[in-house]
Image (spheres, rainbow, N blue to C red):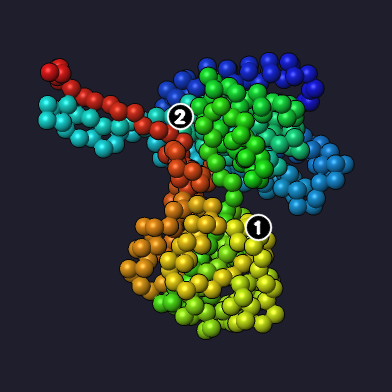
Amino acid sequence: MTTNDTGTTETLVVGVCRAAKAAAPLLAGAGTDVKNAALRAMAEGLVSRAGFLREENAKDVEAGKARGLSAAMLDRLLLNDARIRQMADGIMEVAALPDPVGGIERMARRPNGLLVGRMRIPLGVIAIIYESRPNVTADAAALCVKSGNAVVLRGGSEAIRSNAAISEILRGALAQAHLPADAVSFIPVTDRAAIDVMLQQEESIDLVIPRGGEGLIRSVVEKSRIPVIKHYKGVCHIFVDETADLEQAVRVCVNAKAQRPGVCNAMEALLVHEAVAPAFLPRLAEAMVGAGVELRGCPETVRLIPGTAAATDTDWGREYLDLVLAVRVVPSIEAAMEHIRRFGSQHTEAILTRDHGRAMRFLREVDSSLVLVNASTRFNDGFQLGLGAEIGISTTKIHAFGPMGLEELTTSKFVAFGDGQVRK
C-alpha cells in the first residue's frame, strides 16, 4: 500500500501504534505456555500457507526487477520453500528458549528483614525498522512475543507484500492462541513519512530498533523522540601481539576476514606488532590472497609485502563488507588500543597473544561490545555466545551492549517481600 496523503498516513500509523500499546499489557501478562503455543502456531502457519507467501513474494520480486534491484538484493528478497521453513524453524527455536519474564534475581535480605530482588519484565512496545529481508518480520516478531513485548514492524518498501503476508499469518496465530493480534502490528504503507510519524509516538512506543545500513540508522536517530538502539557499523579489529602463536594467528585472521566478509562482525582492520610483522605478514598475505582478499597496508606493511596497495586515510575506520583488509604495523599494545579507540565502532575487537597480562589488559581497556582473546571476531553473534536468536547487535550501552537476545529485550523492576515492616 502506498499513499501520498500525509494526513492519511499519520492517522494510520498513530492508530497502529496505539493498538500495539493497548495489546502490550495482555501479552506481558501471558504465561510461558501461552506464548509458546502462539509461537508454534506462527511456525505452523508459515509452513501451511507457504503457497500464499510465495505468491505475494513473487509480486515483490517482479517489482524489484522492474526497479532494477541488484541480483544480491533480489536474492535477499526471495522467499522459497526452504527459506519459509527456515523462518518457521527459527520461531520454534525461540519457543524452545528459556522465558526471562517473571524471573527474580539478586535476592538479598535487608537488616530489617525485607527481602529485596529484581524481577524481569518486558520493555513494552518495540518498533523495528528494517530493510530488504522478509525473514526479519518473523524473527523479530517471535523474539518480541517470547519476551512479552508488543512489536510494531516497518519493513522496506521492496518487501511490502511479503512482509504484509507474513504479518497476517503471525497475527492470526496470536488470535488462535487467545492473545491480541495487535501485539504484532505492521505498518502497511511504503510512504517514508510513516517512519517519521512512528518515531514521534513516544506515548505508545518504548524502544526503536533500526536494522539496516548506516544511513538508515543515523536518520532514525536524528528524527526519533524515542530511545534508539544504535549499531552504525562494524569496524572490527584484530591485534596480533608479539607473543602470538603465528600459525594460529593466520588461521584466526583468515576466518575473521574471509569466512563471511559481508557481515558486521567480520574483521576490517588488522594491527600487527612490529616485532613479529616480518615473520607474520608474508605468511598472512599468502593465506589471505589464497582466500581472495585484497590487502591495503601502511608503509611498513607495503615494504614487508611487496605489491600490496598502499592504504589511504579513508581505509582506517572503514567498513568494507567485502574481501578487503586494511593492515597496519604498530609498535606496541598501547598503539594498537589507541588505533582502536580512534577508528573502531565499539563492535568487536580481538587480541592474539600468549601473554596473560596483555590479554587481560586488552579485555579491560578496549571499549567494545565483545572483546576476545585468541579467537575470531566472527563469534559476536547471539547463537555463538549462547543467547540463541538475537534481534541485533547494539553498539550503545543503554540499555544493552552487544547481541540482544530475549533477556536484552527485558528490563528489571525491584520487588520486595515483607512481613509488616514499616520505615522508621
Relative to 95, 105 lies left or right: left
Image quadrant containing the C terminus = top left
Q: Amino acid at mark 1?
A: Leu
Label 2 vs 1, first from the N-terminus:
2
**Does 362 appear above or below 175?**
below
In this rendering, the label closer to the viewer, 2 or 1: 1
- In percent of the image, x 40 and y 33: which residue is there? 411
Percent across and percent down for residue 34 are: 46, 27
Most extreme residue toward the bottom is: 279
Percent across and percent down for residue 62 are: 84, 41
According to the image, label 1 marks what residue?
A: 321
Secondary structure at numbered mark 2: loop
**Does 151 appear above or below 402?**
above
Q: Quadrant of residue 46?
A: top right
Relative to 77, 177 lies left or right: left
Label annotation for residue 39: none
Q: Amino acid at mark 2?
A: Leu
Spatial CA distance of label 2 from label 1 is 32 Å
Secondary structure at numbered mark 1: loop
Q: Quadrant of residue 180?
A: top right
- In percent of the image, x 67 and y 29: which residue is there? 195
Q: Quadrant of residue 286?
A: bottom right
- In percent of the image, x 59 and y 46: which residue is there? 232
Q: Nearer the viewer, residue 54 or 142?
A: 142
- In percent of the image, x 20 and y 35: which residue is there? 108
Relative to 316, 10 lies left or right: right
Q: Nearer the viewer, residue 156 or 277?
A: 277
**Does 298 appear above or below 99?**
below
Label annotation for residue 123: 2
